[in-house]
Amino acid sequence: MAERRKTTARKATARKTSRRTTAKKSSPRRWSQRVTQESDALDLKRGVFKQTSPKKIAASLKRSAEHSSRRKSGAYRSALSMLTFYINRAGKTLPKTQRARLERAKVELKHQFGRE
C-alpha cells in the first residue's frame, strides 16, 4: 500500500514538471522585442529605431504617441519612455553610432514637443 502511494506521488510530480516545461516553451523568448512590437502605449512604425536621422526617429515616435488611444500617460512621456526602453534593452550590443543617434533623437523629441 505504501509503495502504491509513492508511485502515484511520482506521477503527480511528473505531471507538474511537464506542465511547467510546456508553459515555458509557449512563452516568447525575447520579452523586450515583444514589448516594442505589441506595446499597449504605442503602435510603432516598423524599423523606427533603425532610421538614420534623429529628426525622423523623433517625428515617428511623436506621431505614434499622439495617435495612440491606449497610452496611460502623456504623449511626450510615452514616446520618450519607449526610446529609453529601446536604448536600455539593447545595452552593450548597440553600436556607438546608433546609440549616439538615438540620444540625439531624445533631444530632438524634446524640441518637437516644445520642452526645452
Image: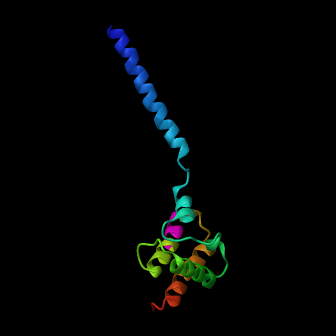
**Residue interval drawn in magenta:** 84-89
Q: In the rendered view of the protein, which quadrant contains the C terminus? A: bottom left
Res. 8 image quadrant: top left
Colour convention of the picture: rainbow
Q: What's the residue at 56%, 77% (across, down)? A: 64
Report the predominant secondary structure element of the magenta stretch.
helix
Q: In the rendered view of the protein, which quadrant contains the N terminus? A: top left
Q: Nearer the viewer, residue 70 or 23?
A: 70
Q: Farthest residue toward the right?
A: 52
The percent position of residue 4, horizontal first and vertical second, equals 37, 11
Q: Is residue 101 magenta?
A: no
The percent position of residue 80, horizontal first and vertical second, equals 48, 77
Q: What's the residue at 45%, 26% (across, down)? A: 14
The percent position of residue 7, horizontal first and vertical second, equals 40, 15
The percent position of residue 29, horizontal first and vertical second, equals 56, 50
Q: Farthest residue toward the top?
A: 1
Q: In the rendered image of this protein, does residue 44 appear above or below residue 112? A: above
Q: Farthest residue toward the front?
A: 69
Q: What's the residue at 47%, 34% (across, down)? A: 19
Q: In the rendered image of this protein, does residue 108 appear above or below residue 72? A: below
